[in-house]
Image (spheres, rainbow, N blue to C red):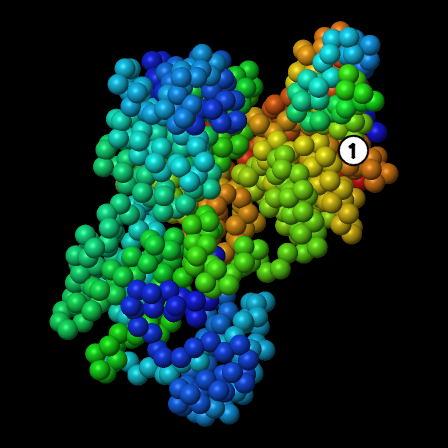
Amino acid sequence: MAMFIRIDVNEDVVRDTGVASKLIETCPVKIFAPGADDKSVTVVDDNVDECTLCDLCEQACPDGIKVVKLY
Amino acid sequence: MRFYEFECRSVLGKYGIAYPEGGLAKTAEEAEKLAGELGCPVVIKSQILASAAREAGGEKVAASPAEAKAAAEEILALEIKGLSPVGVLVTKPVESEKEYALQVTYDAVAKLPVMILSDVPRKNLDDVADDTPERITRRHFSTLAPIRTQVYTAKELVRGLNIGAPELNRLTQIASKLCDLFLQYDLTVAEINPLALTGDGKFLAVDVHMDMEEEGRFRQQGLLDEFGIPSTETRGVRGEPTAMEREAQAIDAEDVRGLISPFVEFDGNMGLVIGAGGGSLTIFDAVTQAGGKPANYCAIGGNPSVGKARRLTKLVLSKEGVNKIAVMSNVVSNTRADLVARGVIKGVLDLGLVPSEVITIFRCPGAWEADAFKILDKYNIDYCDRTVSLSEAARRAVAKLDD
Amino acid sequence: MGIILNDDFTFIVQGITGREALNFTRECLNYGSKIVGGVTPGRGGREVYGVKVYDSVREITEQTRVDGSVITVPYQFTPDAAFEAIDAGIKEIVIITEGIQRKSAVEIIEFAKMHGARVIGPNCLGVISPGVCRFGSLGGPAEDCKKAFGPGSVGVMSRSGGMTTEICNALTVAGLGVSTAISIGGDPVVGSSYAELMPLFEDDPQTEAVVIYSEPGGPMEAQLAQWSQDNNSRLPIVAFVSGRFMDDMPGVSFGHAGTVVHRKVDSPAEKIRAMRAAGISVADLIGDIPRLVRERTGG
């Protein structure tokens, strides 16, 4: 269970902007995995605390992804 | 990595440097058979990666094959410095008229390879240099020019002991061959001691020692294959790794992000999650100087993942009698303090323990320290910033062991 | 001004497209260093943070003055990269690469000597004169680097890159600051030893004291002690020797490749004895370094 970082995903925005595969590729610590279909992503809980706060996911989808520090 | 003498002899053979007739026996029966073939008496010598095997009883002379078998049995069972022999070398004894010591190694001050010759055999050459400096001579040579263009340097070496005909030319040849193989096989030491001059005017390498640099392994696969040395054989002087040390190696191997090794177990009760190379040496000393007894050595470096720091923490706390840890490093530039903090806290929580009770101090200033401090605040962990020295942080950590 | 570097110092990065090189190239540029080119064979024509990438060193030296090169190519290719830089006339070579063979290091150093070039490293992080120039990867991101390396009067030489930062940080926090810090490398054979760099500090008006960080293994501390006895230096030296717990563990390596104690004189205890006999102050605790520097400089 992630304790330090929470990733908020707005599924509709991710779907509409078509960034699912980009998110999966861009995260250096593999937080995103393919979702139910190729337009969506799921968050891999085991990897969330590995987040390096590199912002690449937020840059890829500013309105659909929020990285929240839990500290 | 160190070679066994039987392997060293094989290397000498490739360069035409002669040694006493004989071979390796892995069992007492093989030694008996070999003694019969060579004709007695024979010398039975332990094949072990420890110095001073002779002094420790690892060498015996046998007058018959039966005696050879008995001697081999005894030597094969003899542990020296915690190491066991892989066999015995069975050779013809050498009757020497005169003995020398010849070594090639690196001179880290001159930053060149150096050949060293002495007519005081069977002694550590550093001691010879201290005790009888007039009986030892040195000559540097080049790594850039082929040895065939600098044979004269070997001659100058030999002349340094005022040696003339007939030994001069033969010793020159042996010394330059030793230089050649030293460079060819990426050795850090090649020593023939004693190098015996026999009654019939031959030189024989009665004892040989060679060390190859670890960094040379990838270039020397051919030689290692020839000797049947697998890449997993480290030939370390520390002996077999403990279960904990093996687990640390596994953690490093399974996740390539950053490093936690070398990990070494010690007898104390203060768990250390420390980094990096020089920092770990300094912190280990600081904990000891503050009266603490470290339970382990480790060296976090290269920005390990949260998962790796977490597993390391659990490993350190898994040791019997360890219920407190110190998390410390020098000012970090690459490794991130916040990721270390996350990993350590997760590791402690995994074990059902309370981070503020288990972590005596957290002192990893540098990259991402502001985030680290926020995390540590949230869990009420005692931490310090870059204004607190490693020795002061260690003192604070050790003081809490008595709580 | 410090040593080796100056405001106008120019250098290149060999292996500039590698992961670590990308990082420190950006960090050096942010710090204000003048990087006049990068080399990665096969990647010529690209750009890295505005720095042009070439296929060979000579393509850069033919068009501009190059004072130094930072080499961070895989260890198999390090000797050739160093030979290339030295042959192109570059005089200050920093080799960051770790794990290169001792024989290769000796070859590079011998070649450099023939051409009048200086080698720092291998297995080091480079050189920094705070506020003047940063030549290598010491100190991490420019902002962190400025925190740990304040300008001042103490020259620092260290066998550990991380401990270079640690000690400079302590000197900065204490208000003493650093003239030039050199991570000299953790390998058994390195291009520039303490004793060989001392005359440079001796000639630098900004430097008023020198701090060294040393480890078990090797003859460099004994060499420094000898230098100190032979030269009537104006500079007080404060040393710290780590790995004292290794006194009882001959033959074992814990940290850098160079830390194995082969001979009695390589042990921490013996190094401390020799340096103290030569008038060098040896700090028992790492935290004592700034105080000892103050005592020795009368500050």
Q: Amino acid at mark 1?
A: Lys
* Residue that lies at the very extreme toward the left in this rendered image: B165
Question: Quadrant of the image for the N terminus of chain C?
Answer: top left
* Residue that lies at the very extreme toward the right in this rendered image: B352
Q: Is residue B8 above or below residue B371?
A: below
Residue B190 figure quarter? bottom left
Question: Can residue C157 be seen in this snapshot?
Answer: no
For residue C110, side relative to residue B73 (left or right):
left
Q: Residue at x 36, y 13 (%)?
A: C7
Instruction: Please name whichever residue, C114 or C271, is drawn nearer the observer in this view of the structure.
Output: C114
User: Which class describes the residues within 10 Å of circle 1: few (<14), some (14-19), or many (20+)?
Assistant: many
Residue hosting label 1 = B346
Residue A43 figure quarter? top right
Whole-percent x, y for residue C199 in the image:
30, 31
Whole-percent x, y for residue C86 in the image:
29, 30
Secondary structure category for the residue under label 1: helix
